[in-house]
Image (cartoon, rainbow, N blue to C red):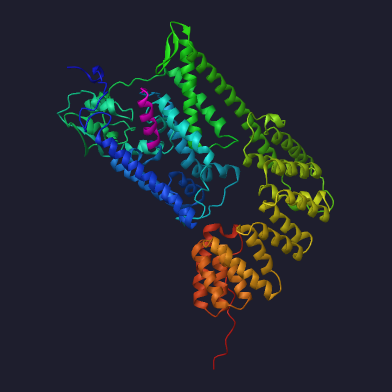
Amino acid sequence: MATPGDVSLPVLTSTPSDRTGPGSRMERRRFAVLIVIQILMIVHIVQWLLMGRTIAPIEPSESIQTVERGVVNIGFIFFVLAIGSTMLFGRFFCGWGCHVILLQDWCGKLLGRVGIRPRPFRSRLLVWLPLGLATYMFVWPVAHRYLVAPWFGDVPAWPGWTVEVTTTDFWATFPGVLMAIPFLLVCGFLTVYLLGMKGYCTYACPYGGVFAPAEQVAPFRIRVNDDCEHCGHCTAVCTSNVRVHEEVAAHGMVVDPGCMKCMDCVATCPNDALSLGFGRPASARNDDVAPKKTHDLRWTEEIVFAVLALGILLSLRGFYGLPLLFASGATVCAAWILWKAYRTIRDANASLHRIPLKRSGRWRIGGVTIVGLSGVIIVASAWLGVVNVAGQIAAIRNDRITVPDDVVYGQGTFITPDPDVRRAAESAVVWYGRLNFVGDGGWSPIPPNRGRYDLIAVRQAWCLSVLGRFEEAFELLGTAIERRGESENLLLWQGVIGEVLRPQEADDWYGEVLERHPEWMQLRDSRVLWRSNEVSAAAAIAEARVGVEKMPDELLPLRRLAVLLAEEDDPLSWEESLALTERTLEIDPHNSGAWRALSMVQRKLGRLDDAEISMKRGVELDANNWRLLAEYALLLDGRGRRADAEAAMDEATRAWTRAGGDGIGPRPRLPEPLPGPASP
């Protein structure tokens, strides 16, 4: 009798019936389910765009907010349920609910149309990368808070548990649209082409790092009966790279943690020998009878290329902060290319699918190309790594500058910092400069994106200000604004302007820039604040009116003008502020701060019933805002509703405790009630 390892797998080039072969009915059903899920995701986004508020993203990565900030969101709830279901039923979610699975299967189908059937890549060490990524994402923040930080006396205050199931900024934690195309190409086509079907899931997905071990305790598994003839159809159609025929022969069930319950093997079996059923979990298997696994890398290669992969990942993730899901996919693809280049150099014959790389020791164009590409990967990774190190050094130097803002700015006379601070600031200026593009005198091989460029400019400007070099800081920020457009971060540095220019000169500077760029709302808002602090309230209001005139449908200028008018001692100004605030709520009815502002103006106008209703609406929208709750309690108390006020203040106290207690301000309290008339 032939052993499992001796089975020759059939090549399925046709579909003999609707239940066998790659085009099985189960595959079509799974694709239909995955497409429906994608449609629901699109509907979710459209609903947010239309209504401004929606259910928070149903995405496991949102769980990071839970482990870091105690925010229980939909993503965390979904992830917990997904892990629980995996521990019972196996990785059904991966096979039937993940959008990346649809992407990989679709790419695999397209490759199959041109005659390419990707061969699965098998590595002992790289397969542990997903677990390492999952540990970094979900375990490290907790370990750092409770195990590492106490050693350095820098324990961040636990904010307490909060629940946030809806959001007004659906895309806040997601990368921009420009990352969609690289993600599609790298995590779809490239991982499938190089690593095989489900290559991204096997070697790069951090969620797979959680689901794979959870799957091992699941009692619901694909099992075999005595009708199995070891024909190998099951393994031939498996897109999860599982050697099904070997595992069921050795264990009576599929034990590979990569099995995603796609069910193609069950639908393909000509003897109905495979089925889903409850029984022993994979963790109870006897490894003494397990078939011997083969791998593409020798142990020396495993270690070398695992180290290289770690270095590439750190280079990609470093200072430029590429999304982890993209960086991990790019990392394993780069590591595979390096390994293939090494094998091409070492061996007399090498190929990539149908592309010959080397034949009988003679190099082909494909071989030269892949070796050249590997050289580019090594140089680029090392280059980016050097830039990342420069960023870390700059941040360390910056952290040593312990000078408050009010000492640096607004003193009239520059105060020379002590020698250690001065040396740290001088060094930080140099190291931050090295993070710029090589064409701008830095070290980076690629221009920093807008967010990184702004960060570099802001930190350099701060360090220059500490050194008293305000003119250089002003020139740096001005250049950054002109080259990269307005930025909220850049506009925070009004202190630089105050040190370099007299009030009128500063106001003129704002005017000149806004004349060229009237659409820059943030810069105009900065000028409004400047005028409010340095000129007059009337001048600030005049500029705010210009902002509303230029951009009548934008919330920022509307809200700024409404606030300034509310601060005036004039009922007519309050009426105008009321109208403006109501207009902002028509645009964004879910803003709790706007409801609070509306309530404040209504109180000034004596409309106390309306003010109470507005504050209640704000509290309903932001039930964890202890300041808002406390203000609502004071409003109720002022209206003689003591019992309701005490209940609201109790809620405010609980929210205050969750937010950090004494570390964020005094405990909210109601004023003592006035004594009543003496009892007879």
Q: Where 602 sits versus 486, above or below? A: below
Q: Does residue 360 appear to the left or right of 311 in the view shown?
A: left
Report if residue 530 lies within the magenta region: no
Residue 33 location (% of width, % of height): 32, 42
Q: Nearer the viewer, residue 640 or 532?
A: 532
Residue 403 location (% of width, % of height): 74, 48
| Furthest residue toward left | 227
The count of marks equals: 0
Report if residue 106 lies within the magenta region: yes
Specify the segment rendered in magenta. Answer: 102-116
Q: Does residue 293 appear to the left or right of 323 in the view shown?
A: left
Snapshot quadrant of residue 602: bottom right
Instruction: Name the main secondary structure of what is drawn in magenta.
Output: helix
Q: Where 114 sits versus 153, above or below? A: above
**Quadrant position of the N terminus in the picture:** top left
Is residue 56 visible in the rendered image? The answer is no
Q: Nearer the viewer, residue 235 or 313?
A: 235
Snapshot quadrant of residue 471: top right
Is residue 444 visible in the rendered image? The answer is yes
Residue 36 location (% of width, % of height): 35, 45
Residue 61 location (% of width, % of height): 46, 44
Q: Does residue 421 appear to the left or right of 210 in the view shown?
A: right
Snapshot quadrant of residue 267: top left
